[in-house]
Amino acid sequence: MHRSKQKLYLRRIGIFLLIMAITAGVMIGIFYKLYDASKQSIIGSWRNKTKEIAQEFSYYIKMPMDAVSFSAIKVNEMLKDNVPENEVGRYLIDETQVYSTIISDNTTGIYGYYRGTYLDGSGWTPPEDYEPTSRPWYIDAVKGDGEIVTVKPYKNLQTFTMMMSVSQLLDDGESVVSMDIFIDGVQKMIEDISEDKHIQEAFVIDKNGFIVAHTDSNKIAVHLSYDGNETDRELYEILKKEDRNYVEFSSSDGSNIVFIEDVNGVWKTVVVLDKRDTFSSLKSIYVMSGAVLFAIAMTLILLFMYLNEKHRENVELSREVEAIADIYMIVLKIDLVRDTVKTLRFNKGDARSFQSSFKNYRHSALKMADQIASGQFKALLERFMDPNTLEKRLEGINSISQEFIDYNNRWMRIRFIVVGRDEKGSLQQVILAFESIDEDKKRQEAFKKLSETDRMTGIRNRGSGESMIKSRLAEGKSGMFCVMDADNFKAINDNYGHKVGDKVIIEIAKCMQSAFRDSDVVFRLGGDEFAAFADGVENESVGRLVIGRFFEAINNMSIPELGDRKVSISVGAAFYPSSNVDTFDLLYMRADEGAYESKRYEGNFISFK
């Protein structure tokens, strides 16, 4: 009996130990998952922080990059048209004035190297021994082969501030457009970030390995690999792998965690954390697991905590997904196999075509496009939404998009995103999303208008006006081209002052706008010279009527500061085409000769050539 009780006791002990072992195994598994989830949550949090930091740097450098890119487009057009250096110089000065009102806080203006001549939009005069082609901004631009490049940071010896150049090589392979930007703001942001005690170091590095900003300001402009220690070189090798945005590695300095985010393709934001310090909060999980391993009740409590934590993470994830989806007005999930549509997001006030639900996408797609798009974009949107060609257009890619103007005259972007394919690669489900880009388009148009407008008069500048006339001539248009020159304008400036002279220029521009049609091209050549192209005016009788209106407006022009003095204009006019081989340059030359001939006569006078 005693032996039998002993066996039962041993059996109970064995069952108890087995239960405890199973419980321990379950608890270890639960706590391991909890530890891994918590670790991933911390990593995700730091990854988001790094993305936010990179986004701030992206805003900082995007405008200068856009400015250089846009100016390069214009100067490339001037290269093709053989525009003289002095006119390009004036254009850079105008552009610098434009950008000074937009990005004045972090740039000194536009400058460049044009057909062997250095041009500076800010008015800086280089010393005699200055050689542009030996400067980093020029050398790196040539290496970039037409891509926008950022140049190694340097210290401005006049202001003792850190600067960096953004440059682009032009189509002739020799000319370069560049802009210098102050990067003290980037350094300030890095220093603010470093106040977080978890961050071991943070810095911004360019594509060539030079440090743009660093928590240790002494490392600015040094090369991470060439000038750094063993840990820096190892980190540099990691940064060269473009697919890496998170990595853990050990070095002589300890175990580190590195978060990497791209900044506009020219910089990288790097945040380095001490691994042990970052995950030190997770140690409590091990203590907790040891304390509750033998308590069944605690198992249930910890399980509840685990599930509650998972629920919280899912809620946060759902909120994050909703936040991302907020940029889309309408989001539809289309099942191409079942030919059904599910509405994931829908703003009733933004799309009249979705007032009633529908089940058949193939039947409704063209009707939907017809209801959403404005008249001139209906055919374009119908082709984009055509379900019969969607498979072929998405072959080998996961997304396609199309911009259009909707029925409310707003710019929109529509996008197909692949959700699922079958084993053969055929489409099964796609997302169809609608996004408003109206504000972005308006900003782009405003920026373009600024660059094409003469700042003093508000009419077109020379580059914009000549470009528009050449386009019309290329389309086969005919008409009258005029060159206007104010008589004795220098005397007005000398006797009445430049402010009065500016008023005269502005009033002449107003007279041109009133005399010519809205469809005509009216622009300022520079100084007191103007030009206009009257579309469809092909003979002197009609031409004299047009210029007569202009002369009448000039005679009625009122500038109190001039008293009884009248402003007179010499005009030269020429008609296009005059022959089968006529060009804009020849047209301009004839009109210019006419203006010169009109100078021989007093008062308003026109000469036809």
Image (spheres, rainbow, N blue to C red):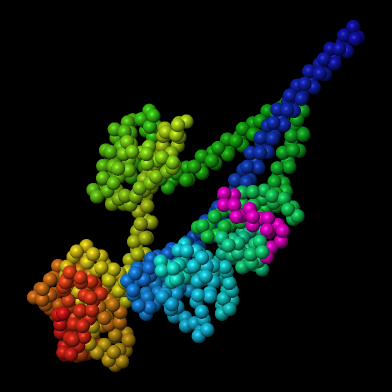
Residue 496 at x, y = what percent? 29, 90
Q: Nearer the viewer, residue 130 or 55?
A: 130
Residue 85 image offset from top left, x and y in percent? 38, 78
Q: Quadrant of the C terminus?
A: bottom left
x 62%, y 43%: residue: 41
- Magenta highlight range: 227-244
- Residue 499 percent location from the top left of the image: 32, 85
Q: Nearer the viewer, residue 315 or 276?
A: 276
The answer to whether residue 81 shows anywhere in this view is yes
Q: Nearer the viewer, residue 378 or 106?
A: 378
Q: Check if residue 232 falls in the magenta segment.
A: yes
Query: Relative to 129, does residue 28 appear above or below in the rendering?
Result: above
Is 494 covered by the magenta stretch?
no
Q: Is residue 37 above or below residue 65?
A: above
Residue 518, percent from left and from top: 20, 67
- Image position of 254 (left or right of 456): right
| Residue 487 falls left or right of residue 136 | left
Query: From this viewpoint, which residue is outermost toward the top?
Result: 1
Q: Residue at x 46, y 66 (%)?
A: 168
Q: Residue at x 74, y 38 (%)?
A: 286
Q: Is residue 82 above or below residue 18?
A: below
Could you tell me which quadrant the N terminus lies in? Answer: top right
Query: Extreme left residue here?
Result: 541
Asked whether 423 or 228 is in front, the reply is 423
**Quarter of image, res 229:** bottom right
